[in-house]
Image (cartoon, rainbow, N blue to C red):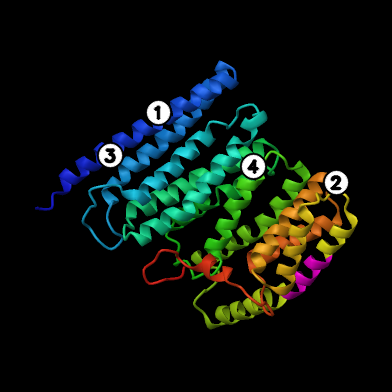
């Protein structure tokens, strides 16, 4: 069959219509559910904001249909494909979440709705790229949708967490970090200033993933505000550092190709990623043991889980998973009895290990491969 791009674009536009109809149907169902739980005015406001988010996504999808081809190719695929369908499902969940902006704080089971919607969106985000690579259906369209939906989703989620008092207002700047970064590059080019390529980074994608994971957990309605706000600072630091270094590199404030930069980077990685985690692991284990012995607020079932996490962190056996468990342990303790220096320091140590890893003198670190690899790639490539 002769390749006919106009015919394929027409077919893709018909599929766009099907996607739009699915969006409209689900939003209509959401309105009906909320109309039964809320006042008519609140349900209509939810529908309006959800529809605005849908319109943004549908405009992006319509514009980007012509990029439904492999990254290095030009021939269009005739269908959107499973992976893009998963990405569009993420977009639909984001629309449902957007409706809660500026609405009264939901009560009862609805209080969990924004968190569950964003957590589900994050889980699908982990797998849509895997499916695209595994099925050899990576497309520029998928990359565009992924970036744009990620940016919209994190902006809405941060806005909701600020609205519920679980993130400080200044966190909105971090929620818009990507958009501000792109705007800064555009302005530099308009002014005729140099713009360099982003230097390679072992942690850029990892930090972004932890950031969105934290925001989804910050939306949980059970946290004390003081605990969530303290955790916000802990997760803001690595993200701000990552964007700050990238901006200094692309704006030519530092020369990321110079031997001096590479020498400083090697020394910093040796100190921060290899040496310091062992000290932090010891401190985290001691703090967790102290809490286990002193706190009366720990449920009976949680004690063995926390003890297992202590062993994981201390021995460096799947240390990041152990650190995640200890972070929850510290946060729940702080939510139950209040934030004090022991659970606060344990939370800080856990977040450090979660971002940096367990470092030297670790017995087993299988999570490092899965955190850095591009899963599903036929060549097993790493990011």
Viewer-nearest of labels 1 and 4?
A: 1
The quadrant holding residue 324 is bottom right
Q: How many marks?
A: 4
- The residue located at (53%, 24%) in the rendering is 33
Q: CA distance from mark 1 to mark 4?
A: 26 Å
Disc 4 crowd, CA 10 A, few/some/many (<14, 14-19, 20+): many
Q: Which mark is residue 25?
A: 1
The answer to if 279 sits in the magenta stretch is yes
Q: Which mark is residue 262?
A: none
Q: Which mark is residue 337?
A: 2
Label 4 sits on residue: 219
Q: CA distance from mark 3 to mark 1?
A: 15 Å
**Which element is circle 4 on?**
loop
Label 3 sits on residue: 15
Numbered range of the magenta stretch: 278-286
Q: CA distance from mark 3 to mark 2?
A: 53 Å
Q: Earlier in the sequence, mark 3 or mark 2?
A: 3
Q: Earlier in the sequence, mark 3 or mark 4?
A: 3
**Which element is circle 1 on?**
helix
Position of 188 with respect to 64 (left or right) is right
Position of 214 with respect to 183 (left or right) is right
Q: Return the x and y of residue 144 as percentages of the image width and height.
A: 38, 51
Q: Earlier in the sequence, mark 3 or mark 1?
A: 3
Q: CA distance from mark 3 to mark 4?
A: 34 Å
Above/below status of 260 relative to 88: below
- The residue located at (43%, 42%) in the rendering is 89
Q: CA distance from mark 1 to mark 2?
A: 45 Å
Asked if labels 4 and 1 touch by Cβ distance under 8 angstroms, the answer is no
Q: Return the x and y of residue 29 as percentages of the image width and height.
A: 46, 26
């Amino acid at each position: 069959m002769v390749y006919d791009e106009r015919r394929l674009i027409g077919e893709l536009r018909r599929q766009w219509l099907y996607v739009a109809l699915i969006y409209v149907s689900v939003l209509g169902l959401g309105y009906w559910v909320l109309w039964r739980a809320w006042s008519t005015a609140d349900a209509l406001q939810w529908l309006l904001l959800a529809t605005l988010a849908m319109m943004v996504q549908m405009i992006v999808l319509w514009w980007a249909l012509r990029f439904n081809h492999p990254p290095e190719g030009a021939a269009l695929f005739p269908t959107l494909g499973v992976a893009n369908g998963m990405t569009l499902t993420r977009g639909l969940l984001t629309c449902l979440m957007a409706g809660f902006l500026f609405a009264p704080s939901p009560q009862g089971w609805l209080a969990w709705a924004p968190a569950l919607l964003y957590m589900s969106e994050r889980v699908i985000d982990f797998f849509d790229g895997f499916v695209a690579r595994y099925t050899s259906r990576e497309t520029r369209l998928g990359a565009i949708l992924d970036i744009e939906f990620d940016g919209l989703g994190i902006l809405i989620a941060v806005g909701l967490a600020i609205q519920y008092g679980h993130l400080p207002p200044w966190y909105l700047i971090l929620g818009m970090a990507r958009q501000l970064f792109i705007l800064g590059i555009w302005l530099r080019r308009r002014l005729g200033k140099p713009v360099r390529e982003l230097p390679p980074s072992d942690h850029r994608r990892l930090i972004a993933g932890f950031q969105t994971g934290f925001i989804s957990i910050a939306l949980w309605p059970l946290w004390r505000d003081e605990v969530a706000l303290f955790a916000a600072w802990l997760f803001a630091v690595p993200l701000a550092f990552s964007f700050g270094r990238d901006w200094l590199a692309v704006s030519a404030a530092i020369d990321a190709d110079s031997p001096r930069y590479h020498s400083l980077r090697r020394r910093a990685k040796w100190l921060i990623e290899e040496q310091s985690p062992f000290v932090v692991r010891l401190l985290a284990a001691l703090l967790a043991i102290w809490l286990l012995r002193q706190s009366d607020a720990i449920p009976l079932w949680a004690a063995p889980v926390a003890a297992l996490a202590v062993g994981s962190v201390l021995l460096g056996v799947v240390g990041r998973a152990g650190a995640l468990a200890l972070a929850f342990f510290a946060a729940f303790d702080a939510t139950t009895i209040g934030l004090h220096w022991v659970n606060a320091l344990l939370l800080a140590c856990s977040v450090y290990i979660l971002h940096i890893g367990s470092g030297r003198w670790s017995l087993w670190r299988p999570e490092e491969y899965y955190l850095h690899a591009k899963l599903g790639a036929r060549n097993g490539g790493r990011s």
